[in-house]
Image (cartoon, rainbow, N blue to C red):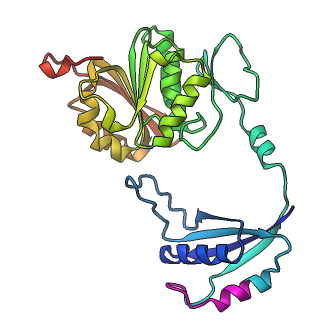
Amino acid sequence: MNWLKLRLHRLQPQQVEVLEEALLGLGAAAVTLEDAADEPVLEPAPGSTPLWSSSQLTALFSADMDVDTLMLELQQQLPLPGVQQLPDWSSDLLEDKDWIRAWMDHYHPMQFGRRLWICPSWQPPPDPSAVNLLLDPGLAFGTGTHPTTALCMRWLNDHAEAGALADRQVLDFGCGSGVLGIAALLLGARSMIGVDIDPQAVTSTQRNAERNSISARSYRVMLPDALPGDTRADILLANILAGPLIELAPMLGQHLKPNGWLVLSGIIRSQVDDVCTAYRDILTLIEVTYQDDWARITGRRIASHSSADHGSD
């Protein structure tokens, strides 16, 4: 079937939920929101659902819905809280198609360095002899398409070739889909702990580990409160965002062995100096690598002989 696509333009935050409920009540099959002011929300607070200062709302209706009748029915519901008159709107017909097939055709194997690939399950690996991580895009963040993930994947590939991953314990903090921790295991790491605030990410990481035939003895996945305080990793990967990275700097440092590697990503170019400042008393040999407007910061934990550094693995 085809669809009537209705767009409401330049909505203020207090108008969005009201109009969304009204359109669903009029029979909308789906409602989505987009930024109407080129105003990305990069770092929402945990548990919050932020909106842009100006949003575009798109609603899909059955193609046999008459748009003039629809807008008249919406007009008759006014005034609504925060909405005194109809916003600017436009509409067109959306041709139905095999969206799943189009999406699958768009997602291809990706290479990170010489040996490491991410491959969707429906396509054969381009190089069967390489390290091929099977991963399908899903709701949890981390499929390799974003520069923040790609920067970390290339670091893992390069350090595996240098033998720096062999028999190491990895902590993947903010694991999302588990892509980084699983890649580390496939490249020779001894064990991996994945941590994420989202229970769905915990489930996604477990499923992806199983899909890649990772032994259950090699990894654990948990929410942050379940991470033992004495955990010390040889390599700590944190692909989150600059704000949380700065806030978590003391805690992440505590979970890293002396001389262990810390790999930070999810940082835009303008935030690099602030993140480096937050870790200057924790890391040495700090190096910054860029891809587009995103950065990866790596360094080794400053060696210490305090008793706090001798926790368990």
Residue lying at the far left in this picture: please name it. 306
Position of 76 with respect to 269 (left or right) is right
Residue 29 coordinates in the image, percent (x, y): 72, 66
Q: Quadrant of residue 100?
A: top right
Q: Quadrant of residue 86?
A: bottom right
Position of 141 with respect to 256 (left or right) is right
Is 167 situated above or below 238? Answer: above
Tell me what residue is drawn at x 56 percent, y 75 percent. Answer: 11
Tell me what residue is drawn at x 45 percent, y 37 percent. Answer: 295
Residue 210 coordinates in the image, percent (x, y): 58, 23
Is 138 situated above or below 228? Answer: below
Is 166 situated above or below 287? Answer: above
Q: Quadrant of residue 150?
A: top right
Which of the pair 154/285 is nearer the observer? 154
| Residue 96 forms part of the magenta stretch | no
Q: Is residue 288 visible?
A: no
Which of the pair 161/250 is nearer the observer? 250
| Residue 78 forms part of the magenta stretch | yes
Tell me what residue is drawn at x 42 percent, y 38 percent. Answer: 196
Residue 109 coordinates in the image, percent (x, y): 69, 28
The image quadrant where one finds the C terminus is top left
Residue 301 coordinates in the image, percent (x, y): 27, 22
Q: Is residue 16 visible?
A: yes
Position of 62 with respect to 156 (left or right) is right
Position of 31 with respect to 221 (left or right) is right
Q: Magenta residues?
A: 71-83
Q: Count numbered badges in the picture.
A: 0
The image quadrant where one finds the N terminus is bottom right
